[in-house]
Image: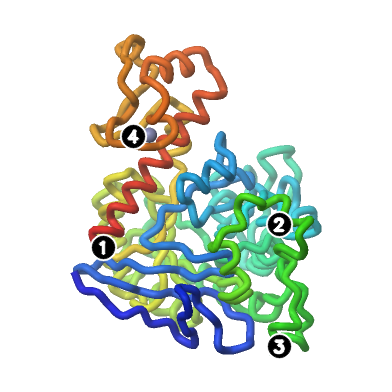
Amino acid sequence: MIKLPILVAKNATKGGTSVPLESEPMSLRFEISATNDRSRRGRLLTPHGPVQTPVFMPVGTQATVKAVSQDMLEELGVELLLGNTYHLYLRPGVGQIRKLGGVHRFMGWPHAILTDSGGFQVFSLSDLRKVTEDGVSFRSHLDGTTHFLSPEGTTEAQIGLGADVIMAFDECTEYPADEQRARASMELTLRWAERCKKYFEEHKEERPWISCQPSALSHQSDCRSLDFPDESANRFFSSARDDRASTATLTGKAQALFGIVQGGMDHALRKESAERTIEIGFDGYAIGGLSVGEPRAVTREIVESTLEHLPKDKPCYLMGVGTPEEIVEYAKLGVDMMDCVLPTRAARHGLLFTSEGKISIKQARYAGDEAPLDLNCSCRTCRRYSRAYLRHLYASKEVLAQVLNTVHNLSFYLDTMRRVRHSI
Ligand SMILES: [Zn+2]
């Protein structure tokens, strides 16, 4: 284990809180405090509070993590949530959320949020999609209406939603894809990345949570935060106005834009994609286009080889993985951020992750089992309820089954990541 002094460019530390020394709005800061072989422990300082890394992000598709409330997420120690631009764009609409102050205020979550670009959902959920140089036209999976998303359009949508970290629009290359197809897709993603970066640079001051005129940008004290404008607005966050939220006033007010590395399952293309994405220049880098049906061993190989080409001083986000064992493995390879629907989706289907392996709570063998779900878990589900009761709730299709199962699975994932951080 190597402990590193915490270095924060342009920042001083005072009483455990980072204080900006410069007056221009800042985006993400990434501090690495320790490394162990290839893994690293650190903190992302976002406008809505610090996030300890490596981090697992619960997925909040419709501005909600299905079945659990925001105060439960806080109790679980969640510091960063993922939101899906595609879903929020279709319903209730970016304009509506923007008018309501951005996605943080809309959903009553004063901590950090990352939004994806919507690209993956367009490719996986919508009908009649047509990809051109300009962008993607597609039909809504909700009502069949036709829409068009471009690199500029999705960046505008993500600025409107106002997440702390937003993602470039990419084409998720299907699997399998031959070398020619993977290259063409990678080249398109690179051209789109440049357009996202250009649009972001020209419009990033339009985020909903700070009313700052461009001329006032060099005087941060002139900027009025719309996050918590007065005490009446704080009624939404009365229990959440902790030090993480108040750090928001100190660590800067700019969104960060991440680029995405593609290149299919081809190591040379992944290297080229990484190098050319870095040339465009982003606040962090994601590895996309994995978990699309390839064997797990291939996923691991591509993650490992792509990481070699990413900058060590920027956060690395591996999109859409994985099982509890996999998130440990990827964190050990040096990944800083991960997200996956698995813990929440599996919970709703009665599949629970425990320290002794997976449990399918629907099985009759649990009908008389008085033990807690996981003796090594201290979540509110395991503290209070028996397997027999959880099995009964599930069999009776009670809403509470989804709540309690999701709380436990998220707790298991977050505990797993906490243990990884402590081991670094
Ligand atoms: Zn539990």
Identify which residue is drawn at 38% across, 15% down. 388
Q: Nearer the viewer, mark 4 or mark 3?
A: 3
Above or below, 306 against 69 in this view is: below
Give the mark nearest the N terminus, 2 or 4: 2
Asked whether 423 or 343 is in front, the reply is 423
Q: Secondary structure at mark 2?
A: strand
Residue topped by disc 4 = 353
Q: Which mark is residue 98?
A: none
Left/right placement of residue 140 relative to residue 53 reads right
Residue topped by disc 2 = 148
User: How packed is label 1: few (under 14 Cα within 10 Å), some, or many (20 or more)?
Assistant: many
Q: Quadrant of the N terminus?
A: bottom left
Asked whether 328 or 111 is in front, the reply is 111
Could you say where residue 359 lies in the image, as x and y percent from the top left?
32, 26
Identify which residue is drawn at 25% across, 60% down. 332
Q: Residue furthest front?
A: 15
Q: Which three-letter amino acid code belongs to the residue tagged 3?
A: His
Q: Nearer the viewer, mark 2 or mark 1?
A: 1
Identify which residue is drawn at 72% across, 70% down. 225
As measured in the structure, the alpha-carbon distance from the residue carrying label 2 to the one carrying label 4 is 39 Å
As measured in the structure, the alpha-carbon distance from the residue carrying label 1 to the one carrying label 3 is 41 Å
Q: Secondary structure at mark 1?
A: helix
Q: Secondary structure at mark 4?
A: strand
Above or below, 274 against 322 in this view is: below
Identify which residue is drawn at 46% across, 36% down. 407
As measured in the structure, the alpha-carbon distance from the residue carrying label 2 to the one carrying label 1 is 37 Å
Could you say where residue 91 lies in the image, as x and y percent from the top left?
72, 45
Q: Are marks 4 and 1 in contact (CB under 8 Å)?
A: no
